[in-house]
Amino acid sequence: MITIDDASGMQQEIQEPVRARDALSDDCGGGSRVSELMSRARRHYLSKEYPKAVQLVGLAIAASPADADLWNTRGVFLRAAGRSAEAVWDYRQALARQPENAGTWSNLGNALVDLKQLETGMVCHKRAISLQPENAELHRNLAHALIVANRHSEALGSLKNALRIEPANIGARFDRGLVYLHLGEYAKGWQDYEVRLHNSMRALPGRRWQGQAYPGRTLLVTSEQGHGDAIWAARYFRSVKALGGKLLVECHDGLVPLFSAMPEVDGVVSQGAPPPHADYHCPICSLAGIFTTKVDAIPAQPYLSAPVDRVAKFQPALAKANGALRVGIVWSGNLEFVKNRDRAAPLTAFMQAFAHPNVQLYSLQKGLLEKDLAALPEGAPIIDLAPLMNDFADTAAALSQLDLVIMTDSAIAHLSGALGRPIWVLLSYEAFWLWLLEREDSPWYPSMRIFRQKAWGDWGSVFDAASSALLELAISHQQAPASRADT
């Protein structure tokens, strides 16, 4: 079984079906030497020590090269290690020896989808289904390929097949929820989205809140997923508070100052601290399912504000724009998030596209990729604000004084939208469900403009469209500069 992160942060289990699981058994049928090697390989695989697992299966293959299960198993381990191109070769070797193995066909399809060979991958998944039509995981794997291809309505049909065969399949229900959310079918989507909590063992105070009035009582909204998810869901605090008594919010440390300043929040609890007494609890990302059953019910007005006492420290750096358009950029999200490699773009692409005359760029990038700035040519028109940003309240103060932010998909996009600040988001082909499909705007954030890839990896057209739009904006700004008070 291979585990990958999906867009929501929940662990989505895409199984390497049937034969891949069989091949991980301690008895591989290739003699005591092969059996011993595979037993050790399995232990390394389960410990996520993938290179060692791959090496041991290689020794087993050398001892028993005709064994299709060994080739298939090494393919599973290679894919887990992020080496999908090599996995494709091993799956093909397995199929040359055992051409009617449905699991290996589906495994090959998964690896090809990793490589964005989507149509070929789907042919493999359909071949697997023809061999084992009543295997729910094979239908789910086809659905995953269709989702990556932005064919969500077709994916919905595959997931319904999976759930017809196996109604209790949690992964298929979660996937179906994300598909519904992509399609804007929120009433259906939120119901399935709740299965993300199915294996949560955390002890929480009080009863689960379902949206009822709670006057005179205390509700704890609990933290889950990433910073961006929390910022997105914070729009509902006002509605939650209107239904009852005391509202407590648990959140990541970096969000504590920002959420503490919200008038509807009575107290903030740092994530990891012991939960306080409360009569009710509710996961933060479940609030949308209570208050928003359709797109036109989204509360979209700005709901966060920058702390006034954080503004001044950015003024010296911002003053260096000398009347030019102040444009913040972010080129990557969390490096540990597996889909970030598709969402992120290189800093050099940002510089080539947006370093226009009458534009002063400001870096809002935090983390390891701040080092990318050092590789730019001397005199590049960009100023690093990251040393001044210690939490999201600082980031909000910086955003409040910029004319525009241009970025790939990450938490600052949500923060900019929540503040009502102008934000352009550059999206990869398979975008987060919140951005819906094909739209150039967002009903969640009216100040947002979206630039989307039209095909996988097509950053060129995205940057060209955003670059031309920014150049027009910079020319207009130079001809008739907007009034801007530097507070």
Image (cartoon, helix red, strand yellow):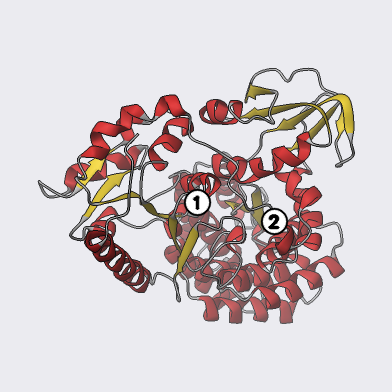
> Which amino acid, by three-letter code, is at mark 2?
Ile
Q: Which-is-in-front pick, marks 1 and 2?
A: 2
| Location of residue 149 with respect to 24 vertically, above or below | below
Q: Residue at x 32, y 49 (%)?
A: 483
Q: CA distance from mark 1 to mark 2?
A: 29 Å
Q: Position of residue 53 (x, y in %)?
A: 50, 47
> Which amino acid, by three-letter code, is at mark 1?
Val
Q: Residue at x 70, y 44 (%)?
A: 285
Query: Can residue 127 be seen at all in this image of the molecule?
Result: yes
| Location of residue 460 with respect to 392 vertically, above or below | below
Q: As rendered, which of 59 and 415 lies closer to the eye?
A: 415
Q: Position of residue 157 (x, y in %)?
A: 76, 76
Q: In this image, 254 relative to 143: left or right? A: left
SS of the residue under disc 2: loop
Count the numbered circles shown.
Answer: 2
SS of the residue under disc 1: loop
Q: Quadrant of the C terminus?
A: top left
Tell me, for residue 298, which label it has, or none: 2
Q: As rendered, which of 127 and 310 lies closer to the eye?
A: 310
Of all residues, the one furthest to the left in this rendering is 378
Q: Residue at x 76, y 62 (%)?
A: 294
Query: Can residue 135 be seen at all in this image of the molecule?
Result: no
The residue that mark 1 highlights is: 338
Q: Position of residue 379 (x, y in %)?
A: 11, 47
Mark 2 crowd level (few <14, some 14–19, many ≥20, 10 Å Cα): some
Mark 1 crowd level (few <14, some 14–19, many ≥20, 10 Å Cα): some
Earlier in the chain: of badge 1 and badge 2, it is 2
| Location of residue 248 with respect to 287 vertically, above or below | above
Q: Where is residue 396, by image quadrant?
A: top left
| Location of residue 466 with respect to 398 vertically, above or below | below
Q: As rendered, which of 166 and 292 lies closer to the eye?
A: 292
